[in-house]
């Protein structure tokens, strides 16, 4: 197959945009954290880049897109280290039917794996050992992310080749199940295993720098055009539709969130606007190429409203989701996945004359993703808890995790004499 240089350039650009999302997430989460733990929060994103960036080349691609093992995951040894079976030319010139070099697709997909793991970190801010996080990252991406990517995009159980396709073809354009439901469920399971921060619900734990939050949200929005637009696998009208839908849904979600805040709290906040950005981006991810621009307004606006209410559930139900990963990624990811049953075009969605088949399938794939991610994360989380342990000491948590775990602080004047001396020693 002859190389398509235009497609290749678009996909390399998209991959770079998606990679930028993880530093953007670090800023977003870092600003939402308390000043004594901002560096640790940002390091969890960069740690995910370090671990997953290596693992993906070794066995991540093969587990995601190799020959299927029972429809659950690809053979990890088939293309271990991006080799085997003559699939990859040594100079990276092997191309798929569309004219895209396979090595470019590897890079694009690796960035998805990185950001998915990094998303989870916001739920467990302020209280987790950095070493435990890195170990979790490597195991979880192997046992949860790669298999779900294979099930949905690699010809597995949740794809067009799976059992649900006899009802209707499952739709997950860019990662509603693989990325957001997967990460959101993992976040919920981990916060239940690890427990609450000291003082949760009793003392204020406000974002320390809303400017960083807004900047991070802007970078996430910018990078998301690669996330959704690149998932069209073409510099064409499908990518243009994904671009427009991504913009429109996100704008509508900001409005939905701010309206809830204004009527409920009396103020439309910058944190609400930034959170609305993420809720809209999450919701449109599975639907970006399969709804109309008008449909994307409804998807985004409803996501903003749902997540604005959902982030308060942690106080009512007593789980400490530090930076609202569950309320935003799980809730809006579920909504975006199920919403396709109503809004999918081409006579598939209920509102477009398609009947209930697509809705049934979207609910089913969401439920499978919830159960799978929940069980896998539970096993990994408990294993880490009973071996090396998840939590830093109470003293470290109170004084601030940055200095104890990383030997530095984000701002002058935030220090503890005891931990400073320990680090120097």
Image: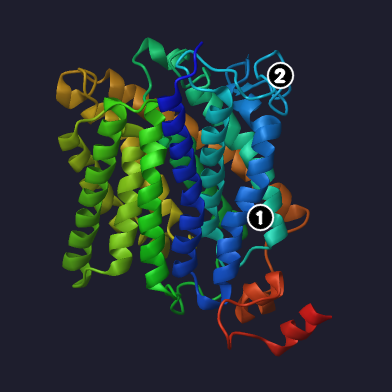
Q: Position of residue 259 (x, y in %)?
A: 17, 60
Residue 171 appears in the rendering = yes
How is the rendered protein coloured?
rainbow
Which residue occupies the foreground of this view, 117 or 126?
117
Give the label, 2 or 1, closer to the camera: 2
Q: Position of residue 182 (x, y in %)?
A: 50, 40
Q: Is residue 31 above or below residue 333?
A: below
Which residue occupies the foreground of this view, 297 or 112?
112
The secondary element bearing badge 1 is classed as: helix
Q: Is residue 254 above or below residue 157?
A: below
Q: Quadrant of residue 355?
A: top left
Q: Position of residue 84 (x, y in %)?
A: 72, 17
Res. 78 mark: 2
Q: Quadrant of residue 258?
A: bottom left
Q: Residues within 10 Å of mark 1 (few under 14, many from 20)?
A: some
Q: Position of residue 13 (x, y in %)?
A: 44, 39
Task: Residue at 68%, 52% (x, y): give it.
Answer: 134
User: In this image, 78 relative to 313: left or right?
Assistant: right
Which residue occupies the foreground of this view, 424 or 347?
424
Q: Residues within 10 Å of mark 2 (few under 14, many from 20)?
A: some
Which residue is identified by label 1? Answer: 133
């Amino acid at each position: 197959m002859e190389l398509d240089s235009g497609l290749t350039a678009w996909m390399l650009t998209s991959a770079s945009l998606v990679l930028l999302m993880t530093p953007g997430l670090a800023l977003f989460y870092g600003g939402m954290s308390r000043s004594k733990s901002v560096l640790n929060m940002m390091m969890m994103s960069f740690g995910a880049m370090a671990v997953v960036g290596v693992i993906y080349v070794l066995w991540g691609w093969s587990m995601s897109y190799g020959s299927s093992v029972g429809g659950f995951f690809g053979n990890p040894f088939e293309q271990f280290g991006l080799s085997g079976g003559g699939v990859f030319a040594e100079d990276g010139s092997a191309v798929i039917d569309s004219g895209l070099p396979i090595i470019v697709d590897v890079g694009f997909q690796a960035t998805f794996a990185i950001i998915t793991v990094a998303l989870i970190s916001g739920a467990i801010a302020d209280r987790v050992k950095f070493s435990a996080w890195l170990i979790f990252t490597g195991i979880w991406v192997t046992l949860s992310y790669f298999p779900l990517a294979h099930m949905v995009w690699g010809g597995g159980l949740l794809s067009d080749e799976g059992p649900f396709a006899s009802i209707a073809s499952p739709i997950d354009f860019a990662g509603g199940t693989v990325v957001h439901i997967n990460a959101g469920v993992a976040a919920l399971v981990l916060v239940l295993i690890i427990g609450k921060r000291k003082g949760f619900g009793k003392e204020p734990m406000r974002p320390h720098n809303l400017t960083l939050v807004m900047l991070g949200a802007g970078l996430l929005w910018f990078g998301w055009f690669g996330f959704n637009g690149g998932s069209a696998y073409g510099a064409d009208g499908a990518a243009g539709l994904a671009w427009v839908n991504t913009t429109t849904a996100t704008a509508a979600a900001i409005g939905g969130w701010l309206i809830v805040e204004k009527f409920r709290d009396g103020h439309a906040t910058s944190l609400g606007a930034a959170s609305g950005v993420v809720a809209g981006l999450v919701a449109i991810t599975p639907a970006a190429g399969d709804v109309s621009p008008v449909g994307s307004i409804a998807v985004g606006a409803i996501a903003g409203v749902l997540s604005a209410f959902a982030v308060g559930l942690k106080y009512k139900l007593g789980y400490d989701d530090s930076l609202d990963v569950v309320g935003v990624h799980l809730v809006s990811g579920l909504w975006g996945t199920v919403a396709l049953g109503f809004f999918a075009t081409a006579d598939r969605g209920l509102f477009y004359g398609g009947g209930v088949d697509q809705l049934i399938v979207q609910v089913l794939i969401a439920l499978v993703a919830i159960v799978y991610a929940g069980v896998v994360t539970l096993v990994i989380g408990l294993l880490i808890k009973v071996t090396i342990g998840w939590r830093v000491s109470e003293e470290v948590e109170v004084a601030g995790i940055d200095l104890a775990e990383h030997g530095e602080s984000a701002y002058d004047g935030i220090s503890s004499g005891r931990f400073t001396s320990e680090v120097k020693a």
